[in-house]
Image (cartoon, rainbow, N blue to C red):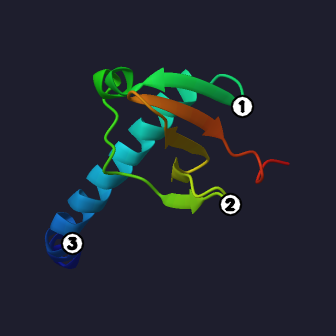
Amino acid sequence: MCRNSYNNRLNSDSYNVVRNINNQLRRNRRILEEICQDDKAKTTKSTLITRGFDFNFITSQRTTQKGNIYHFVYDYGYLELENDIYLIVKDSRNEK
């Protein structure tokens, strides 16, 4: 019991950081999923921010042949267009 308590205290700070990052990533993905009901959708930056989206948390980036950079949160990505409009896409390559 003492050993468990010691290890829990030792790792609690790092677990909190990881937990908070994972929570924000899940929140970001859920927001993108709610907006993108089909394979593609458009929304505004203010809509994303109002819902709690944090642009600092992504899982990957992909650059197209045209040089556009998509930012992904797991299987949902977004591309910044002009005038604070964002294109939301769903990556269905891993679906079976």
SS at circle 2: loop
Residue type highlighted by circle 1: Asp
Residue 51 lies in what quarter of the image?
top left
Residue 39 has which mark? Answer: 1
Residue 85 position, x and y percent, is 45, 27
Residue type highlighted by circle 2: Gln
Name the residue at the right extreme. Answer: 96
SS at circle 3: helix
Residue type highlighted by circle 3: Asn
Q: State left or right for residue 79 relative to residue 8.
A: right
| Viewer-nearest residue: 48 or 28 | 48
- Marks 3, 2: nearer the viewer: 2
SS at circle 1: loop
Residue 43 position, x and y percent, is 48, 22
Q: Which residue is mark 2?
A: 65
Residue at figure coordinates x 42%, y 53% from the top left: 58
Of the numbered discs 3 and 2, the one sitting upstream in the chain is 3
Q: State left or right for residue 22 relative to residue 62.
A: left
Q: State left or right for residue 72 relative to residue 39.
A: left
Within-10-Å neighbours for mark 3: few <14, some 14–19, many 20+: few
Residue 11 has which mark? Answer: 3
Residue at figure coordinates x 21%, y 76% from the top left: 7
